[in-house]
Amino acid sequence: MTDHKNQKIKKALLLGSGALKIGEAGEFDYSGSQALKAMKEEGITTVLINPNIATVQTSEGFADKIYFLPVTPYFVEKVIEKERPDGILLAFGGQTALNCGVALYESGVLERYGVEVLGTPVQAIMDTEDRELFVHKLDEIGVKTIKSEAVNTIDDARAAAARLGYPVIVRAAYALGGLGSGFCDNEEQLVSLTEKALSFSPQVLVEKSLKGWKEVEYEVVRDRFDNCITVCNMENFDPLGIHTGESIVVAPSQTLTNEDYHYLRQLAIKIIRHIGIVGECNVQYAFDPASMDYRVIEVNARLSRSSALASKATGYPLAFVAAKLGLGYGLFDLKNSVTKETSAFFEPALDYIVCKIPRWDLGKFHGVRREIGSSMKSVGEVMAIGRTFEEAIQKGLRMIGQGMHGFTGNRELSIADIDHALAEPTDKRIFVIAQAMMKGYSVERIHELTKIDRWFLHRLANIVSTSDELSLCDKLENISEPLLRQAKQQGFSDFQIARCVLKDSMADPENNILQVRELRKRLGITPVVKQIDTLAAEYPASTNYLYLTYNGTENDVNYLHDHRSIVVLGSGAYRIGSSVEFDWCSVNALLTVKKEGWRSVMINYNPETVSTDYDLCDRLY
């Protein structure tokens, strides 16, 4: 086999993303750490610029040299002057690194010091970041984008909106997490939003609103030999109009037909070939399932939070592979380091469902608006894995730490409040849907108010109907074995079951939970441990990437019972006051456990973290 690696690269500079912010959090610590590992494996000296001391990538053993400096053109140039790297990696530090890299390229710094951009060429990055270039580029291959006009003044924005017709969406170019964006139904709203957006960015986009269409995303990988695969596709539970970072996201998509899925997949490959991405990128679509009409919303020529989710959801080491492709390797040269058995040229096949749910901390602020929309407010996210949508979403809703009740069982709302909260989404919308269903709203009525796909709503209705059936039992011994099994397969916790059945006697919840557990074990209803093998068990794979489910009959792993395992508990979703620093603690604990010759076991459900990376511990739950 020929070695396609770029032999000229002896020293590489990696740009981090700096301080954690909304829309740019732990996922870039994870992608940067993987990229550093990939470089190290090739014997390349690595230099990292990242002033965030709480990250894993800035700790000992990852980069050869670390500069705790701002990721800005001025400081990066000083480091380039001193270190003289052969190559620079821009795709692993979020929008911060990307914008900095583009500035260094445009000012001629990279050329002056002979620094090669590894991976996607800067021109391709500019083609995806600058709206006009992007639309023009996709027009060349007849791919549809959302009708939009780039403007620099309020008067131009007025004229653009008049041409496009209201409603429109306003968004700042080169911005992070939908900063300064929003929907406008009239000129007054347009003026106030445009003023705000222009304070963040010199260029503002006014585009036609497609609120209510589906939002679908594909993670695509391409090497310099033009080989492409799609690693994962994801679908937003919420329709277009709510930022992906604010949305519940399901992978793989559940409501697309086979024809829809392959149609969008082929388009994604066509797009990234034309733009010339090398490594990884994601393509976001607005999709109208009624007519198969679509628009490309955007292409991110870098790793994103969605890529971290896709990587954890499929067990495909996206950032690691992207870094190797940036060095010139082909997909056919690389092994998938998770399965160890298959080439990186394999498209993962999933026999499970992954559900990502954002977590907000809006309760910590006075006077904050709880509505969610095109600008991100969530501070963290959780990822749940199950064999059915019901199981995955209920697990996820408990993981965000906003109550033990899963989908059902939150506070009462009036009908007027319910209608308003369904039509104008807030951070609590999923619980409002449960309230509406318990008050007798039909799936059709909820669909009209929310535009959420009926498939998801029917699945949520299944949970409510099981909850109603349990409520009729009034004593634990009255629950039949099939009903208890069904409840567990739909993700009900023992607490939820106790609450449904023993409504009036929840003064001692601990005891009630134990009673449900005892009944369950007596009936032989226990969970099994399943492996994420990324190949839907079609090929052998040796992963120790695991989840628990009641939808199965046997464990995928053999337990040795040799008392040589040590469990490290992760800290779950990022929230204000608990974020990447505890990921750093977990990772260091795991590395120490391993070093001392014990089996390291990680339990965590945050897809943005380094601790949920497949190769840091012996077993990952």
Image (cartoon, helix red, strand yellow):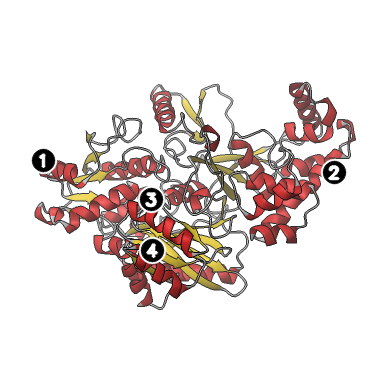
> First in sequence: mark 4 or mark 2?
4
Report the mark closest to the observer, 3 or 4: 4
Report the mark closest to the observer, 3 or 1: 3
Q: Are marks 3 and 1 in contact (CB under 8 Å)?
A: no
Please state which of residues 386 and 328 is positioned toward the viewer in this rendering. Answer: 386
Question: Which quarter of the rendering shows the C terminus?
Answer: top right
Q: CA–CA distance between discs 1 and 2?
A: 70 Å
Mark 3 secondary-structure assignment: loop
Residue 286 pos. (x, y %)? 51, 65
Tell whether 107 sits left or right of 295. Answer: left
| Mark 4, residue position | 205
Mark 1 secondary-structure assignment: helix
| Mark 1, residue position | 82
Query: Which disc is residue 176 wearing?
Result: 3
Residue 48 pos. (x, y %)? 24, 39
In the picture as drawn, the residue positioned furthest to the front comes out as 188
Q: Is residue 258 above or below residue 467?
A: below
Q: Is residue 52 above or below residue 41?
A: above
Q: What amino acid type should be assigned to the residue bearing mark 2?
A: Glu
